[in-house]
Image (cartoon, rainbow, N blue to C red):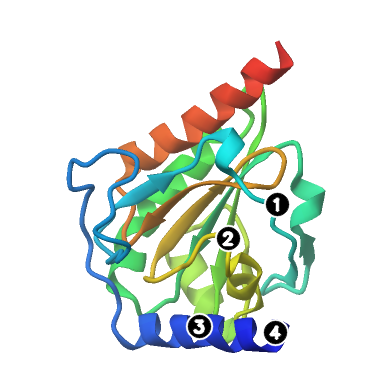
Amino acid sequence: MRARSVVAAVAVVLAALAGCAPAGTDDGGGAGAVDAGYESGDGSFTTWEPDERGEPVEHTGTTYDGTEVDLASMRGDVVVLNFWYAACPPCRAEAPDLKAIAEDYTGQDGPGVQMLGVNPRDDTGTAQAFERTFDLPYPSLHDERAQAVAALEGVVPLQAMPSTVVIDREGRVAARVLGQADPEILRGLIDDVVAEDAGQES
């Protein structure tokens, strides 16, 4: 069964890579803005209340500079995973916004926020050129076998490139954006998870 889920996850990624999702914004439907179970890469987003979230996401991967990263080691912080690849126009369009968000949340008081890219397609040279071009302050995992995507399979399907997932301090998926993320919406999603976590400690 595990092998089948990995194959399915890879198929989803390859389909997304074949036709990079268009940019867009939420359609006004709110936190569950989806259409009859079909979610296009239009910037629509979904959130899950704490009691609706599943098990923590488990994944260990390697960044393009060879550093091993274990999501479990990030527990206690809010983690933002951004799935991207260099030739994807909306991935390039949202990169400056993601850079600004990562810089703004670094060193803030209260629960920490960490950002991590996930790239299922590019070789090291291509990915690092993208990171230099946009001066990204966070690393990306080289997910050539789509193992990070497979880790989310059955928890939160990723049906577009780019996609962004917000993970709570317990390692559970709290929100997802399909397609280019509106920076204000993404900041709001992050702030909501940070606030709920801070409230649990008070």
The numbered mark, 1 or 2, whose residue comes first in the sequence reads 1
**Mark 4 and mark 2 residues within 8 Å of each other at the beta carbon:** no
Label 1: how many Cα within 10 Å (few below 14, some 14–19, many 20+) = few
In the depicted view, which residue is nearer to us: 162 or 134? 162
Q: Nearer the viewer, mark 3 or mark 2?
A: 2
Q: Which amino acid type is shown beneath numbered disc 3?
A: Thr
Observer-nearest of 191 and 66:
191
Alpha carbon distance from label 3 to label 2? 30 Å
Determine the residue positioned at 58% across, 70% down.
Answer: 153
Write the residue at 71% across / 82% down: 2
User: Which residue in the protein does label 1 denote?
Assistant: 55
User: Sequence-wise, which precedes: disc 4 or disc 1?
Assistant: 4
Dot 2, crowdedness within 10 Å: few (<14), some or many (≥20)? some
Mark 4 — residue?
A: 1
- Residue sitting at x 51%, y 84%: 121
For discs 1 and 3, the disc positioned in front in the rendered view = 1
Q: Number of labelled discs?
A: 4
In the picture, measured across the screen, residue 30 lies left or right of residue 105, that is: left
Answer left or right for 148 relative to 30: right
Distance from the alpha carbon under mark 1 to that under mark 2: 8 Å
Mark 3 or mark 4, earlier in chain: 4
Three-letter amino acid code at the position of disc 2: Val
Q: Which comes before the other along the chain, label 4 or label 2?
A: 4
Mark on residue 155?
Answer: 2
Q: In this view, does 35 lie to the left or right of 73?
A: left
Choose the circle earlier in sequence order: 3 or 2.
Answer: 3
Residue 14 placement (x, y as % from top left): 44, 87
Between marks 4 and 2 in the image, the one whose residue lies nearer the viewer: 4
Q: Mark 3 points at which residue?
A: 126
> Which quadrant of the view contains residue 71?
bottom right
Label 1 is placed on what type of residue?
Answer: Glu
Q: Quadrant of residue 50?
A: top right
